[in-house]
Image (cartoon, rainbow, N blue to C red):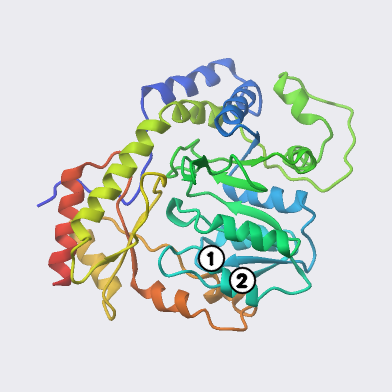
């Protein structure tokens, strides 16, 4: 019997992060300042591109879309099987998220379905890197270029992942990451936008501080700008020094976090590979840093009952994600059925994956799942 409760996901916070936060608290400058500046510079070096930090990954998507000029009644192609944040960021701009199907092999956007939903109003495509997997990025960018579309990569799951030996975020149009409490690295909350497009970065940089011109420059100097101008809609989306201080220490530990996640996902693969009842997603963990690990249950499985039984054995599970086209707010936007999404969603189950997990616990989880199924 497993005595310790095994959480689905959790951060791994050490003394270094706690001391970093205490240092910021002792300075008594808690807003956006020098720590955020340092974190952005470190992320610039990590990606080899310009980065701006903000309050969370949803804000990053919203700012990026707005800076691209995506607005009222514009359409953005995005898979339905994603967290509602992707859809909310689009509709927050006044644009319309067009729900697309997914590829069953990867749970990333089905480009064939996206092509069918292309219209004169389509202005962008938002590929979601589900579980850290970038999917068919080359094909997505070719499709976007052929049709004059912008690409906003929802890379919330993919910090540290690579695509064809290049870091996700180090190339392409615009990539947005999340640093919330359970992501590959965390700031407690937080997110960032990465791009080489100077105009987008300039617009997003000012919009995160209520549209106040040159406010970032003043904040990074620990000053306030009392006489200013505002020329465009902005939001209170900036990151705080407390958050950045945690993120800087987490970034130093990324190599360990990434290798641990890869090791555990590979071990799950070994335990489920020859299963007659459980199907898995065959991802390349040499390049993908997995944020979550989802399995496919046998057709007809009572997922709710199974989750309760696993919880009784001290194993927390999750469901990633409730398809957006089934949500009341977005239900009316869906015209065609999403065959793959509707087929696989009832069978998806996410099981524990985080750097605080060990191989013995992974084996316990896999064994319990097999016991319940069989």
Q: Which quadrant: the C terminus?
A: bottom left
Q: Are marks 1 and 2 in contact (CB under 8 Å)?
A: yes
Residue 6 visible, this orientation: no
Residue at position x 37%, y 51% in the image: 284
Q: Which residue is mark 1?
A: 109
Residue found farthest to the bottom:
336
Q: Secondary structure at mark 2?
A: helix
Distance from disc 1 to disc 2, alpha carbons, whole Å, reads 8 Å
Above or below: residue 205 compared with residue 309: above
Q: Secondary structure at mark 1?
A: loop
**Badge count:** 2
- Residue 119 image point, x, y percent: 74, 74
Residue at position x 29%, y 39% in the image: 356
Above or below: residue 8 compared with residue 88: above
Q: Quadrant of residue 183?
A: top left
Horizontal relation, residue 13 to residue 55: left or right: left
Residue 60 visible, this orientation: yes
Number of residues whose C-alpha sits closer than 10 Å to that of mark 2, classed few (under 14), some (14–19) or many (20 or more): many
Q: Which residue is mark 2?
A: 114
Depth check: give the residue in front, 131 or 357: 131
- Residue 349 image point, x, y percent: 33, 64
Label disc, if present, on residue 242 of the rendered structure: none
Residue at position x 26%, y 77% in the image: 301
Residue found farthest to the left:
1
């Amino acid at each position: 019997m497993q005595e310790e409760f095994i959480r689905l996901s959790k951060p791994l916070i050490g003394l270094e992060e706690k001391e970093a936060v205490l240092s910021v608290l002792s300075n008594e400058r808690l807003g956006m300042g020098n720590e955020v500046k340092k974190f952005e510079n470190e992320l610039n070096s990590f990606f080899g591109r310009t980065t701006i930090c903000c309050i969370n990954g949803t804000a990053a998507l919203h700012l990026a879309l707005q800076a691209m000029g995506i607005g009222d009644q514009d359409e953005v192609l995005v898979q339905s099987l994603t967290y509602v944040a992707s859809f909310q960021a689009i509709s927050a701009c006044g644009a319309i998220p067009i729900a697309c199907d997914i590829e069953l092999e990867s749970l990333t956007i089905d480009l064939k379905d996206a092509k069918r939903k292309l219209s004169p109003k389509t202005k962008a495509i938002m590929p979601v890197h589900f579980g850290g997997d970038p999917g068919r990025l080359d094909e997505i960018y070719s499709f976007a270029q052929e049709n004059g579309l912008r690409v906003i990569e929802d890379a919330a799951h993919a910090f540290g992942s690579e695509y064809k030996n290049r870091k996700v975020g180090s190339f392409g149009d615009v990539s947005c990451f999340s640093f919330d409490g359970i992501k590959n690295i965390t700031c407690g909350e937080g997110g960032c936008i990465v791009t080489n497009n100077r105009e987008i970065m300039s617009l997003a940089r000012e919009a995160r501080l209520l549209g106040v011109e040159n406010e970032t420059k003043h904040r990074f100097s620990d000053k306030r700008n009392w006489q200013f101008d505002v020329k465009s809609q902005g939001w209170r989306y900036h990151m705080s020094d407390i958050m950045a201080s945690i993120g800087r220490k987490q970034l130093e530990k990324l190599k360990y976090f990434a290798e641990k996640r890869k090791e555990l996902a590979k071990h799950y693969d070994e335990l489920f590979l020859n299963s007659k009842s459980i199907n898995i997603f065959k991802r390349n963990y040499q390049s993908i840093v997995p944020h979550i690990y989802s399995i496919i249950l046998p057709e007809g499985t009572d997922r709710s009952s199974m989750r309760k039984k696993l919880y009784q054995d001290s194993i927390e599970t999750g469901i990633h994600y409730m398809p957006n086209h089934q949500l009341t707010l977005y239900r009316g936007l869906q015209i065609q059925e999403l065959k793959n999404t509707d087929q696989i969603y009832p069978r998806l189950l996410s099981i524990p994956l985080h750097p605080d997990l060990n191989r013995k616990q992974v084996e316990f989880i896999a064994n319990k799942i097999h016991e319940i199924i069989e």
